[in-house]
């Protein structure tokens, strides 16, 4: 079988969504969010969104975590284009936000919830930026009032469009920490953990590449991985 790709959700969760690799999840979050939302530590949460009523839709998030300050994060990776993904992303955010509040708790206890959606397709056709950040602001003045809602989209195919690109052309695009992780997700095949060029020679990327190289899947996981890849 070809080298496993981290773009498949099963592999992505084994790299970023397990306790022993929390440092990689923290690095990915901090590369994506603003300075004010940087995290020092995270606690992984149950990815199953609870159903409050029998008729509620069951949703399973890829990675759900809470920071040391109480902020909630949902990180999703999606290989194939699905209709109404914007609605799905907003639904996941709403569950992440509202499930914080327990009986008799005050609304003041609610913390910011941030959705990070990594997409292997073009979802936003109105611009060429691969990373977009969405918040609610007042239409005319741009005043941010509802500060607890934030959604990020990372469209991988906008970052790496040419399947024939080489390492040199990839390096020219590396300007930020998020560029590094996007390069890992899109062109890990060009990266050698034992010989990373300067801009990419960071501990967390080396660790991620090592995990990818040594990832062991059970027979059941391998079948699920191949099904998702197809």
Image (spheres, rainbow, N blue to C red):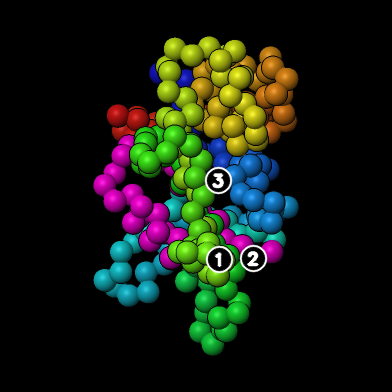
> Based on the displayed image, in which of its 4 quarters is residue 44 positioned?
bottom right
Q: Which residue appears at 29% of the width and 44% of the height?
A: 82
| Residue 203: x %, y % from top left | 72, 30
Q: SS class of the residue under badge 3?
A: loop
In the drawing, what numbered circle is on residue 70? 2
Disc 3 target residue: 17
> Based on the displayed image, in which of its 4 quarters is residue 168 positioned?
top right
Disc 3: CA contacts within 10 A as few (<14), some (14-19) or many (>=20): many
Would you say 72 lies left or right of 40 here? left
Residue 44, compared with residue 182, is above or below; it is below
Q: Nearer the viewer, residue 84 or 99?
A: 84
If you read the primary sequence from the N terminus, does the residue marked by circle 1 or circle 2 appear first?
A: 2
Residue 189, compared with residue 41, is above or below; it is above
Q: CA distance from mark 3 to mark 2?
A: 18 Å
| Residue 6: x %, y % from top left | 49, 32
Q: Which residue appears at 61% of the width and 77% of the height?
A: 109
Q: SS class of the residue under badge 2?
A: loop
Disc 2: CA contacts within 10 A as few (<14), some (14-19) or many (>=20): some
Q: Which residue appears at 38% of the width and 41% of the height?
A: 126
Q: Which residues are magenta?
A: 69-94
Q: CA distance from mark 3 to mark 1?
A: 35 Å
Disc 1 target residue: 143
């Amino acid at each position: 079988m070809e080298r496993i790709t981290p773009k498949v959700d099963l592999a992505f969760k084994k790299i970023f969504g397990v306790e022993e690799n929390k440092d990689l999840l923290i690095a990915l979050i901090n590369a994506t969010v603003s300075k004010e939302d940087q995290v020092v530590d995270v606690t992984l949460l149950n990815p199953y969104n609870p159903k409050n009523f029998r008729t509620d839709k069951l949703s399973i998030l890829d990675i759900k975590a809470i920071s040391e300050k109480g902020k909630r994060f949902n990180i999703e990776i999606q290989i194939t284009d699905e209709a109404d993904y914007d609605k799905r992303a907003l639904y996941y955010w709403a569950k992440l936000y509202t499930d914080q509040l327990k009986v008799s708790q005050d609304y003041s206890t609610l913390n910011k919830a941030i959705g990070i959606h990594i997409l292997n397709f073009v979802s936003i056709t109105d611009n060429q930026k691969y990373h977009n950040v969405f918040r609610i602001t007042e239409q005319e003045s741009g005043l941010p009032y509802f500060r607890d809602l934030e959604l990020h989209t990372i469209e991988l195919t906008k970052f790496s469009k040419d399947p024939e690109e080489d390492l040199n052309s990839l390096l020219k695009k590396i300007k930020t920490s998020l560029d590094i992780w996007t390069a890992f997700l899109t062109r890990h095949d060009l990266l050698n953990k034992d010989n990373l060029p300067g801009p990419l020679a960071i501990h967390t990327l080396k660790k991620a590449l090592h995990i990818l190289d040594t990832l062991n899947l059970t027979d059941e996981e391998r079948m699920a991985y191949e099904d998702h890849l197809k």
